């Protein structure tokens, strides 16, 4: 079914800049509500810095818990942006257009959030600079490039910088539109931010080439980031279940699964909150769900292989760990919830076109996926550490403390607040891509049937 | 202002559907050139030598290490011929029109996969039983395997069966995709080909319902093929490589193996297109666009080759346990270090460096060069893996069950019969494909016609563009 | 020498914009002195415009080289300056250094590319010259850079093509 509507540029400007040129009624109360949670979260961080990590549930041997789980979770979500933006751009998928900006934005803000967790997990965050930067010439102590813990800041730093620049470059034409529709200090701000964009053929050509070139450059970074995060675990031979060669692609595809689901969540919210029915249409959810089916099946394949090879070794500790993860209370409950929410419930539902085109169902199934994917990381990290191993002399179980739950809540409020703040100043759906779609799509008639067609440039 | 008002008809210099039918289904395609005949005789001679190689291997009846090159050759055939049909599937699912002319070349590779499945049977007699340690260590002791406690005829019975299933699904897909072309040959061809085509077309007359069924069958066989390809790579790579080496525990390896299959399948199709253009006179129908798109995919899979390899390597390198170290030594830095260097050069560095340049990807000669490099690199890769695995015969069985390869096997050099096998068996597969092209057009006629229907060169204000219809 | 002027003709449909571009070429204005301004990218050459060349592809190579050099200096320098053996790895552990080198190489390439995009787009240039806000509402602007004595010629060509309004800056 053809859902595309022909819209002129005035309408596109008016509708897509709705949140920028005027303030929706719900916006301020929502931002203030989120701000309260954010301040609460920062207060919890302050308490933790003051009192020490003892206020968390971490102990020996479970020294990585909710913070690292949430770090991996948010890095995973960040994979939405480049997956959607770069891959769909390179494959010239027409349906990408309303999705790209939101996905890139999710990348930037979820990475910013992810960064917090290893920082606060260190207890004394300022000391992290010793790990990363070679500045202590007085004592001659320098970072250790052989430690995977130093790879993370480089990977995430690169991804965050690259994603932010990618986002900014793709914003330039839209900043030009905002400049032309505003007055006063806002006009001055957008004039400077758009760098004097005029929309001549040179600038458009560069914009097109930039989309392809930056996509091609960002894709290898995107793959490397979660791989490097996975190596935090995989290059550690001492923890059962972690030392697996499959971890890098397994983490990446899991990240894509959770990231694309997060984009679905966000798209539904955008449609409901700003009423962008003309732009975010059921066909987009349908396409995202089809993509998610492929990704989820691939991810399940990797999960299966990881599990098979865990048992394949015939080593008693490895088998005991799997038994604990799947059959021992309370891990078995978590495992069942994880399996149901990340795969067994949403994926079969997505096979039905009616579900794929139902925005409310897509919204809730995407939320389920991310509940499951958070649990997946938790089940990878914690049971491995809590198994008895040689040479460990203290034994304690891990119970997530209220403070840790509070900081998990903070992370969601923080990302949402940043998103809403962004939405006040910049368009969440790229205007120029939407307009380009109008210019590059048409209908062709073959016999008695009319089908959508796209315009492809010839070299 | 709507886009349609800015578009006017443009000059269309593509061959018409009538021309295409005459070329691919009419009398124009009936005679094989003398060059092609000579090439097929050379392949047949090489294949005969390959069969001689297998017979000698059996008569010789040496240890299992002598079968490494045979296993490597079959692994390479699975890699190359098994992966090629994906070109007929994946882009179709993604509605990528460019792939249409290349789909036939990819799908015909299943003929060679069927040959590979047959050739796998003799090797199963040399694959050690899961209970090979039971004489020494007791009945309940088995070597590591993904078959765990399954009956004793696993994996020997299942591997050829699984590979044969892949071949059957692939052949079914190739056949279904060729039905409209058989109908065209039936209507426009002559002689024995017309008679064959009449039977194979199964009364296809292009009614809407027939097209609907055809598309549905292509979809089903395509999805099945993809699933089977993953499964075959999984079982083949573990049963014939990983599980033979004590201590080699590598969950990414089946995916590395599958990725190699995509990389080699792409390379095979690129070379197929190049050869069809060079000697098959199809340059008006296939060329630049396919090379450009397949070249990009080849570059992507080449980069992924390194990623998958490194993901595995870095974990072993950091592990530093005896099992991890001996795995690296066996496969990378030990007896096959020079081979590994060749793999690294030909499967990654060289094709990456060739394909990174837009001008090279944008030519009809660039991707074939990269394809040759990749195929050579991946053949060496399979030799590195399978010859090493088949030579890792454990001396100390007790240590082997605990996952430790206590003694590094020496380099296993090929003898003349191994060379026969390595040259002859792929030649046999290729011969099968070439024989099939005598009956089925090497370029899919109906897909060219459909592509022509839904694409149209037009003028957009002052420039020329291509209008591409996207039917559901 | 007369001062350079910027003359803009505004059109409400792409066809008229393309006619104006044709007209300017016929009137002897050199390629590169007139341009079309649009609120959305059109297929390249749709207005018969001069297709601009760029050297963007050089930037990532340069950036990657800088990034790689910095990475080698950082990883090798810090390990040699503080040679503590950890995890039984060599001091210069190439396979670990490779990961940081990869990231910094890519970072260099991306940053340089973005610099290249801005530079090649001839930005920043806050002086818009003759411009109209309606261009970002779907109108087509055709802008001519010419010396004072040709301003009238340009206006005439733009008007003949059906300009709704003509602006000079």
Image (tube, coloured by chain):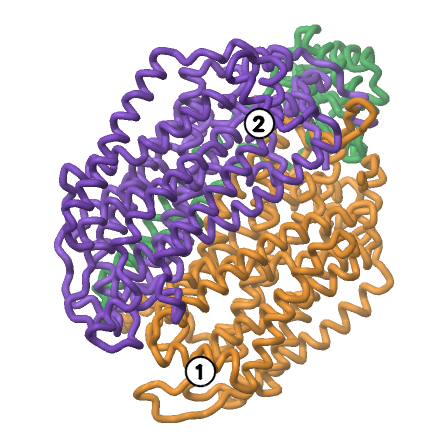
Identify the residue under disc 1. Answer: A63
Q: CA distance from mark 2 to mark 1?
A: 67 Å
Residue C63 visible? no
In the rendered structure, the colour chosen for chain A is: orange
Disc 1 crowd, CA 10 A, few/some/many (<14, 14-19, 20+): some
Of B369 and A17, the residue lying toward us:
B369
Identify the residue at horizontal 38%, vertical 27% (top origin).
B368
Kindly identify which chain the residue marked by label 1 belongs to.
Answer: A
Rendering quarter of residue B82: top left
- Colour purple maps to chain: B
Identify the residue at horizontal 62%, vertical 41% (top origin).
B219
Rendering quarter of residue A231: bottom left
- Residue B200: which disc? 2
Q: Nearer the viewer, mark 2 or mark 1?
A: 2
- Colour green maps to chain: C
Horizontal arrangement in the rendering, residue B438 relative to residue B35 (left or right): right
Rendering quarter of residue B130: bottom left
Of C52 and A338, the residue lying toward us:
A338
- What secondary structure is found at the residue carrying circle 1? loop
Identify the residue at horizontal 56%, vertical 81% (top origin).
A332
Quarter of the image that includes the C terminus of chain A:
top right
Residue B397's spot in the image, x, y percent? Answer: 19, 71
Kindly identify which chain the residue marked by label 2 belongs to.
Answer: B
Identify the residue at horizontal 60%, vertical 55% (top origin).
A80
- Residue A174: which disc? none
């Amino acid at each position: 079914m053809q859902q595309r509507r022909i819209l002129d540029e005035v309408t596109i400007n008016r509708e897509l800049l709705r949140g920028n040129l005027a303030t929706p009624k719900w916006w301020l109360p929502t931002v203030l509500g989120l701000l309260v949670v954010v301040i609460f979260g920062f207060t919890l961080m302050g308490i933790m810095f003051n009192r020490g990590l003892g206020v968390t549930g971490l102990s020996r041997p479970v020294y990585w818990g909710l913070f690292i789980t949430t770090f991996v979770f948010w890095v995973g979500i960040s994979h939405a942006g480049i997956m959607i933006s770069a891959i769909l751009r390179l494959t010239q998928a027409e349906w990408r257009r309303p999705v790209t900006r939101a996905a890139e934005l999710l990348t930037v803000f979820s990475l910013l959030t992810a960064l917090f967790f290893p920082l606060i997990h260190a207890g004394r965050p300022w000391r992290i600079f010793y790990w990363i930067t070679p500045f202590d010439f007085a004592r001659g102590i320098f970072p250790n490039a052989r430690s995977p813990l130093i790879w993370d800041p480089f990977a995430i730093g690169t991804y965050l910088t690259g994603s932010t620049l990618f986002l900014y470059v793709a914003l330039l034409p839209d900043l030009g539109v905002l400049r032309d529709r505003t007055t006063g200090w806002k006009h001055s701000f957008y004039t400077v931010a758009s760098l004097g964009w005029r929309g001549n053929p040179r600038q458009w050509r560069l914009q097109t080439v930039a989309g392809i070139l930056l996509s091609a450059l960002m894709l290898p970074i995107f793959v490397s980031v979660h791989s490097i995060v996975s190596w935090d675990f995989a290059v550690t031979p001492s923890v059962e279940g972690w030392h697996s060669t499959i971890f890098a692609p397994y983490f990446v595809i899991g990240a894509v699964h959770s990231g694309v689901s997060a984009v679905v969540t966000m798209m539904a919210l955008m449609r409901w909150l700003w009423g962008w029915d003309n732009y975010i249409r059921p066909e987009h959810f349908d396409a995202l769900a089809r993509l998610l089916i492929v990704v989820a099946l691939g991810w399940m394949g990797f999960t299966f292989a990881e599990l098979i090879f865990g048992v394949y070794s015939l080593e008693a500790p490895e088998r005991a760990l799997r038994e604990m993860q799947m059959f021992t209370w309370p891990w078995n409950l978590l495992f069942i919830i994880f399996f149901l929410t990340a795969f067994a419930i949403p994926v079969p539902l997505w096979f039905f076109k009616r579900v794929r085109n139902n925005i409310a169902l897509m919204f809730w199934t995407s939320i389920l996926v991310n509940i499951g994917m958070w649990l997946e990381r938790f089940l990878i990290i914690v049971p491995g550490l809590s198994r008895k191993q040689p040479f460990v002399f203290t034994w304690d179980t891990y119970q997530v403390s209220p403070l840790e739950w509070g900081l998990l809540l903070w992370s969601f409020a923080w990302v949402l607040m940043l998103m809403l703040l962004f939405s006040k100043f910049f368009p969440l759906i790229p205007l120029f891509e939407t307009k380009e779609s109008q210019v590059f799509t048409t209908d062709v008639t073959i016999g008695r049937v009319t089908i959508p067609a796209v315009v492809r440039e010839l070299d | 202002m709507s886009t349609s008002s800015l578009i006017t008809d443009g000059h269309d210099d593509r061959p018409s559907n009538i021309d295409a039918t005459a070329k691919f289904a009419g009398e124009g395609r009936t005679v094989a050139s003398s060059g092609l005949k000579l090439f097929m005789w050379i392949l047949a001679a090489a294949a005969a030598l390959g069969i001689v190689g297998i017979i000698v291997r059996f008569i010789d009846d040496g240890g299992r290490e002598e079968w490494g090159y045979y296993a490597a050759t079959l692994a390479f055939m699975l890699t190359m011929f098994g992966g090629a049909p994906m070109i007929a599937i994946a882009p179709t699912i993604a509605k990528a029109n460019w792939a249409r002319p290349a789909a036939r070349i990819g799908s015909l590779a299943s003929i060679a996969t069927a040959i590979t499945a047959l050739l796998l049977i003799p090797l199963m007699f040399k694959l050690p039983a899961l209970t090979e340690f039971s004489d020494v260590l007791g009945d309940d002791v088995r070597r590591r395997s993904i078959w765990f406690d399954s009956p004793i005829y696993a994996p020997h019975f299942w591997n050829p069966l699984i590979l044969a299933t892949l071949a059957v699904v692939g052949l079914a897909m190739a056949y279904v995709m060729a039905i409209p072309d058989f109908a065209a040959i039936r209507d426009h061809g002559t002689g024995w080909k017309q008679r064959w085509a009449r039977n194979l077309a199964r009364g296809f007359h292009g009614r809407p319902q027939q097209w609907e069924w055809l598309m549905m069958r292509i979809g089903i066989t395509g999805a099945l093929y993809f699933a089977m390809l993953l499964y075959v790579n999984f079982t083949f790579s573990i049963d014939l490589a990983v599980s033979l080496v004590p201590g080699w525990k590598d969950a990414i390896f089946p995916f590395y193996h599958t990725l190699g299959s995509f990389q080699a399948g792409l390379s095979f199709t690129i070379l197929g297109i190049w050869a069809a253009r060079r000697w098959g006179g199809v340059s008006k129908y296939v060329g630049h666009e396919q090379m450009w798109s397949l070249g990009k995919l080849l570059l992507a899979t080449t980069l992924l080759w390194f990623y998958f390899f490194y993901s595995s390597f870095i974990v072993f390198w950091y592990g530093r346990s005896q099992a991890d170290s001996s795995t690296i030594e066996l496969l990378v830095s030990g007896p096959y270090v020079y081979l590994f260097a060749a793999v690294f050069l030909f499967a990654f560095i060289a094709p990456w460096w060739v394909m990174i340049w837009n001008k090279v990807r944008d030519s009809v000669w660039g991707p074939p060069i990269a394809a040759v490099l990749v195929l050579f690199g991946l053949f060496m890769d399979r030799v590195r893996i399978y010859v090493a695995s088949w030579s890792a015969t454990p001396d100390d069985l007790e240590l082997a069950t605990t996952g430790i390869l206590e003694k590094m096997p020496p380099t296993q050099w090929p003898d003349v019969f191994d060379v026969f096998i390595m040259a002859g068996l792929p030649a046999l597969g290729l011969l099968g494909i070439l024989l099939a092209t005598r009956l089925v057009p090497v370029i899919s006629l109906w897909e060219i016609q459909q592509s022509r229907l839904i694409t149209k060169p037009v003028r957009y204000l002052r420039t020329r563009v291509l209008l591409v219809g996207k039917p559901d | 020498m007369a001062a350079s002027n910027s003359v803009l003709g505004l059109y409400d449909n792409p066809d008229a914009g393309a006619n104006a571009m044709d007209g300017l070429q016929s009137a002897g204005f050199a390629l590169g002195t007139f341009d079309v301004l649009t609120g959305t990218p059109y297929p390249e050459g749709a207005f018969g415009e001069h297709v601009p060349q760029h050297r963007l592809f050089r930037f990532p190579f340069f950036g990657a080289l800088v990034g790689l050099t910095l990475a080698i200096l950082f990883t090798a320098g810090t390990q040699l300056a503080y040679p503590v053996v950890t995890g039984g790895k060599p001091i210069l552990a190439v396979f670990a250094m490779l990961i940081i080198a990869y990231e910094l190489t890519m970072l260099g390439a991306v940053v340089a590319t973005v610099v290249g995009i801005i530079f090649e787009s001839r930005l920043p240039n806050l002086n818009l010259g003759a411009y109209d806000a309606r261009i970002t509402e779907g109108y087509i602007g055709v802008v001519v850079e010419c010396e004072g004595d040709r301003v009238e010629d340009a206006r005439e060509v733009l008007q003949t093509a059906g300009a709704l309004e003509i602006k000079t800056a």
